[in-house]
Image (cartoon, rainbow, N blue to C red):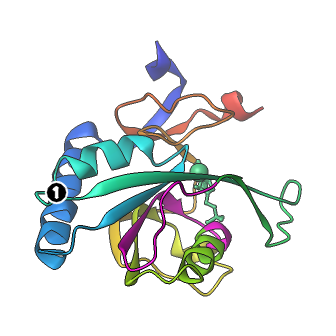
């Protein structure tokens, strides 16, 4: 049913699974003995995070934050509103911030500073997708699934108007859907 709205598949379910397994293996190696805390940025990261965690063979736990950015349409003020805060004390913990996509970088640079102020032992960013062409904030990810072109994509957690998060692959919508 959803497939009829998709113009082109960017990353198939198999490609996503293979890459997520590679990232999980790297994190498993890098965090041996460190019991990392994964902090997912809702809502977009939830599918990626669920698969990534199952590819990590370590003692670890998870928390979530939900944010929205102020500013309308194309103008972002750089301010981020926290709709759901951390439930854990992150002091002394090794934090891995999990995002679906690093776009302007405004959200993640704000969240990184916000968590850093709470004195974690370390903080790294893991994003499934990176759109470096659109970066405004001075931030880069430590773990990147794929670099992706400057197109609006949906699926595997990513939405358009809250829809298509449940697509098992990532693709571009037909232009008439945005109209
Ligand atoms: P930014 O890096 O602060 O600009 O915001 C990143 C957020 O914008 C992501 O968490 C997504 O929710 C959203 N986003 C950016 N690009 C896309 C896209 O191509 N499809 C769906 N959501 C996107
Ligand atoms: Mg998001």
Where residue 103 appears, x then y in whole percent?
59, 66
Where residue 7 appears, x then y in whole percent?
50, 34
Where residue 106 appears, x then y in whole percent?
68, 72
Disc 1 residue crowd, few under 14, some 14–19, many 20+, Cα 10 Å: many
Q: How many marks?
A: 1
What kind of element bears circle 1?
loop
Picture quadrant of ligand 1: bottom right
Q: Residue 67 occupies which quadrant of the picture?
A: bottom right
Residue range (magenta): 85-107
Q: Which residue is drawn at 82% across and 66% down?
A: 76
Q: Residue at x 44, y 38 (%)?
A: 8
In the figure, is residue 27 to the left or right of 46? left
Front in this rendered view, residue 65 or 88: 88
Where residue 170 appears, x then y in whole percent?
41, 42
In the figure, is residue 126 to the left or right of 79? left
In the figure, is residue 29 to the left or right of 156? left
Judge whether residue 1 can be spotted in this image: yes
Q: Name the residue under label 1.
A: 56
Q: Which residue is drawn at 24% across and 58% down?
A: 60
Q: Is residue 8 above or below residue 142?
A: above
Judge whether residue 11 can be spotted in this image: no
Front in this rendered view, residue 51 or 32: 32
Does the segment drawn in magenta span residue 105?
yes
Front in this rendered view, residue 12 or 143: 143
Q: Residue at x 16, y 70 (%)?
A: 26
């Amino acid at each position: 049913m959803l497939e009829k709205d998709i113009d082109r598949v960017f990353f198939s379910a198999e490609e996503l699974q293979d890459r997520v397994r590679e990232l999980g293996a790297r994190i498993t190696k890098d965090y041996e003995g460190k019991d990392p805390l994964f902090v997912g940025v809702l809502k977009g990261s939830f599918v990626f995070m669920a698969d990534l965690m199952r590819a990590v063979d370590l003692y670890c736990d998870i928390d979530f934050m939900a944010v929205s950015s102020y500013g309308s349409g194309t103008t972002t003020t750089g301010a981020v509103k926290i709709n759901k805060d951390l439930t854990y004390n992150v002091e002394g913990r090794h934090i891995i911030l999990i995002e679906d996509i690093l776009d302007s970088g405004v959200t993640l640079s704000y969240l990184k500073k916000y968590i850093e102020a709470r004195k974690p032992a370390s903080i790294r960013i893991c994003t499934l997708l990176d759109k470096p062409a659109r970066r405004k904030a001075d931030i880069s990810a430590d773990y990147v699934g794929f670099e992706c072109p400057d197109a609006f994509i949906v699926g595997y957690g990513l939405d358009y108007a809250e829809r298509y998060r449940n697509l098992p692959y990532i693709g571009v919508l037909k232009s008439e859907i945005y109209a």
